[in-house]
Amino acid sequence: MELSSRKKQILKVVVEDYIETAEPVGSKVIAAQMEGKISSATIRNELADLVEMGYLEQPHTSAGRIPSPKGYRLYVNELMEKHALSVAETEKINEALHIKMAELDDVISQAGQMMSLLVQYPTYMMAGGKGAETLQRAELLFVDENSIIVVLMVSGSRVKSKLLKSDLPITAEQLPALSELLNRHFTGIGAAELGHRLMDLSGSVPPELFLLLSAVVSYATEILEEAGKQEIITAGTNRLLKLPEYRDVDKAHELMSFLDSKKNLPIPAAGAPVEILIGPENVDQALKDSSVVVASYDIGDNMKGLIGVVGPTRMDYASVAARLSYFAEGLTKMFGKNELPAKKETKDE
């Protein structure tokens, strides 16, 4: 059944007032915000209809109404106005995006913490390959006759290094040829192929160098297998304790434990830049009373990432979605060209 324009207007007022106050919304509050003069009796009738239709709920201890998941969904799909980021908001996000490009997991961790600070809700970040991770370049640095430093660059320009020990003596003069061998035969292939390539070369490499080559290839295989796993990092889970919806310690603990487990966290549908999942729309039971706003970003080199915000169904969806979208766009720019996104249309505070 299609809602009348007045019912939609009332629903919009209830949702936005409840988002702001976390208190059930009564007819007097609604009347003060409605266009035109509408009696309290008329508003109460409309509220009763909205409750019967499943868009609102009435707590037993209150005369006011609160939105249901169905009501939030209609609000997000049809009634929510697009949030225009203010100049102050875009500057704050741009400042947060000045993240030192280091190890990927460090960048992801910093980004998650910054986003949690911006929205004041817990966040989670994921990054993973859309294809197989490959070795891009290898360098061997001489330390002493029994030690070298292996420096490996893998997909996404991520650099890993490790000190390797050798039972046989090594000379500095041997390393350039071994580095050249690694870069000619072992780059551009995934972890599963490294071992096969090593065996193919077993007859053409001197035994004393083959042992060192095997150790380097073993380390490269370990790094590529680890890089191929999806990184999941959460931030700001303790922010839940400041929200009235999670004053119940057991309820807060259940959601915090779920986030810390890093399992079954929602991912956006293919092609959706930002997706909003409200209460029961989330698959996992731990999120049945919470909402998730999630956006994707490109890391480059066949890699994709996503960032999600978790909070109560009373979340300010318009503001969170706008900030998250801009932040995700900024991450894509940062990983791709190391630049921030162009400023979008803003409003003064």
Image (cartoon, grey):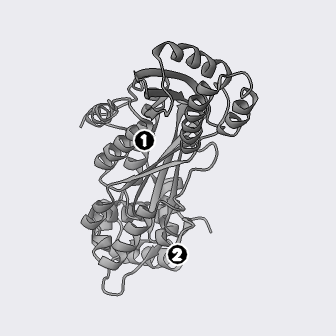
225 versus 51 height, above or below:
above
180 versus 257 height, above or below:
above
Residue 71 in the image: state x and y as whole percent.
49, 66
178 versus 110 height, above or below:
above
- Which quarter of the picture shows residue 163? top left
Residue at the extreme bottom of the image, as rendered: 60
Quadrant where the C terminus is found in the figure: top left
Residue 52 visible in the current orientation: yes
Q: Looking at the rendered structure, which numbered label has been put on residue 105?
A: 1
User: Closer to the camera, 126 or 162?
Assistant: 162
What's the residue type where badge 1 is placed? Asp
Residue 176 in the image: state x and y as whole percent.
53, 13
- Which quarter of the picture shows residue 206? top right
User: Closer to the camera, 223 or 9?
Assistant: 223
Residue at the extreme front of the image, as rendered: 168
What's the residue type where badge 2 is placed? Gly
Residue depicted at x 27% and y 35%: 92
Q: Secondary structure at mark 1?
A: helix
Residue under label 2: 54
User: Closer to the camera, 330 or 215?
Assistant: 215
